Image (tube, helix red, strand yellow):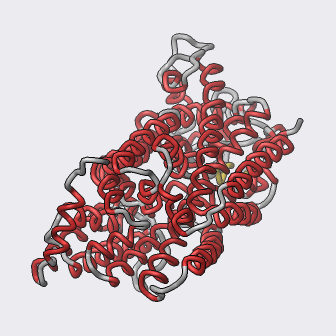
Amino acid sequence: MDLQTLSLIAVGLTFVVYIAIAIWSRAGSTEEFYVAGGGIHPVANGMATAADWMSAASFISMAGIIAFLGYTGGAYLMGWTGGYVLMALLLAPYLRKFGKFTVPEFIGDRFYSTTARAVAVICLLMISLTYVIGQMRGVGIAFSNILNLPIELGLVVGMVIVAVYAVLGGMKGITYTQIAQYVIMIFAYSVPAIFISLHLTDTALPQFGLGGTLADRPDTHLLSALDQTLQDLGFGAYTDRPGMGMYNMFLLTLSLMIGTAGLPHVIVRFFTVPKISDARKSAGYALIFIALLYTVAPAIAAMAIYNFSNTIQTGPVGDPEANLPYDQKPAWMDRWENTGLLIFEDKNGDGRIQYYNDKNPDMVAKADEWGWKGNELVKFDNDIMVLANPEIAALPNWVAALVAAGGIAAALSTAAGLLLAISSSVSHDLLKGIFMPKISPKAELTAARISMLVAIAIAGYLGLNPPGFAAQVVALAFGLAASSLFPVLMMGIFSKRINKEGAISGMLVGLISTMVYIFLYKGWFFIPGTETLPDDPSGWLLGINPSGFGVIGALLNFLTAYVVSGMTKPTPVEIQKLVENVRVPRAQV
């Protein structure tokens, strides 16, 4: 059976499962819609949290960014997993004890201010909309590959599917759907990695295959062979790439860590368990489930780029016969060219694919001697690496179909969680909490579903023109979470001194400073009179990469909150007692 048919069957069956679960677990009350009734077992919640967390960035883009960045791409692995430790220790149990539906509701009550709640909603919307752009892009990429359509049409198909099961089931339906999606994801990610590792290194576990020797050359390590292959093409050794530098790698890692701990759609998952102690257990289980996928990503990255390079370059560099003829290219290249994410240009008219680093002076000099006119793969999007990986390695079609289903599951699971966070903030925090406090539960539930549909439409529109590939876009969302919500949650739990004026000022300073820096240097807006191009390091403030600026925004948030709180009225006594009560353990938890 051909790949497209198998992919359609695999994805179609998973959609039947998702929609059946949504119908079976249809939310009948606001509590079920917002927090699944508060009765989810910690193991089930840990699995659902892992699926909610392992987004298109994790499944589709993370291995791709590691493949092209080298070891500095490990910042994403360290930051995203380290953030869960912070969340489990510093936030989850205390927020669960507070017993509210949403993060803005906690902030509004803790800082005794509807204004603080409204500002928290603004922060949440900015974070969630930026984050969901990456998910919608992942949905579009996966569907465009399966259906052989442009990415724009693939994105529209994905929007319709997520609208059906997210709007219908709410948190209750999303939770059980995400458990099914996790199972699909982990199989889809691990199975091809195991096959490829066995083929290349005779080692079943990809984590060990990454450091193993080649099956056909037992005296050569996989990474050594990969280094040599890329050096021959002028790209530099895979294991020794300059990347972003230690300074920016540290800032990016820390920004991802505290951004993870401040993500509202993940935090709300800890409101769905019966007891406070279950919140901490859920975070522990989630880390285990996440590790099953994250520890495989570096192996997939290295093996995919190794197989790809050897597919394009079949012999010594410079030998005309070693370059793959374009008319003999594998079928997977033809499919990805149809999506626009892979573009070939025959610059010297020889009908063969020249793939090399045309920014390396030494390589350019050699290429001139060989009659090459530049790298002819003028576009190779990072986000296609994982989805194309089984075909690059010539695995059976059913494996590639499984990966396609997994990629869609990853994007949809996180998109659903984000959209629920958006709809909850609009219906519960804005309508019921501020503008319409007497709204009926039925009307509130209707408002939540309508706001989710609007959010899907906005996210889909923005997903058509993202400021980068999926992992980069997600990193920007983490920067916003790090600079706005994480500091105010930490101060709300551990500091009685911070008052409403300090919290509001801190959130606004953190959010605005980070948004301005990110949007300016990612090219979302341009200051007249400046000549600095987006993503040009020479114009960055103190050399700070926009993806890591969330740390600076968080520091500004903390500093502003403490200064303003010291200059205004102290926190009321009853709020100080509330803070103490949240931190004091109870006998039955």
**Residue 345: percent from left, percent from top:** 73, 53
**Residue 445: percent from left, percent from top:** 59, 74
Q: Quick check: can you spot residue 480?
A: no
Residue at 49 percent across and 38 percent down: it is 289
Q: In the displayed structure, does residue 35 sit left or right of residue 146?
A: left
**Residue 460: percent from left, percent from top:** 65, 69
Residue sitting nearer the eye, 542 or 344: 542
Residue 81 sits in quarter: top left
Q: Quick check: can you spot residue 547?
A: yes
Q: Residue furthest bottom?
A: 435
46 versus 308 height, above or below: below
Q: In the displayed structure, does residue 107 sit left or right of residue 10?
A: left
**Residue 248: percent from left, percent from top:** 33, 53
Q: In the displayed structure, does residue 329 sit left or right of residue 118?
A: right
Residue at 24 percent across and 60 percent down: it is 582
Residue 287 sits in quarter: top left
119 versus 584 height, above or below: below
Q: Locate the N terminus and report the quarter of the image it occupies.
A: top right
Residue at 81 percent across and 53 percent down: it is 147
487 versus 431 height, above or below: above
Residue sitting nearer the eye, 366 or 378: 378
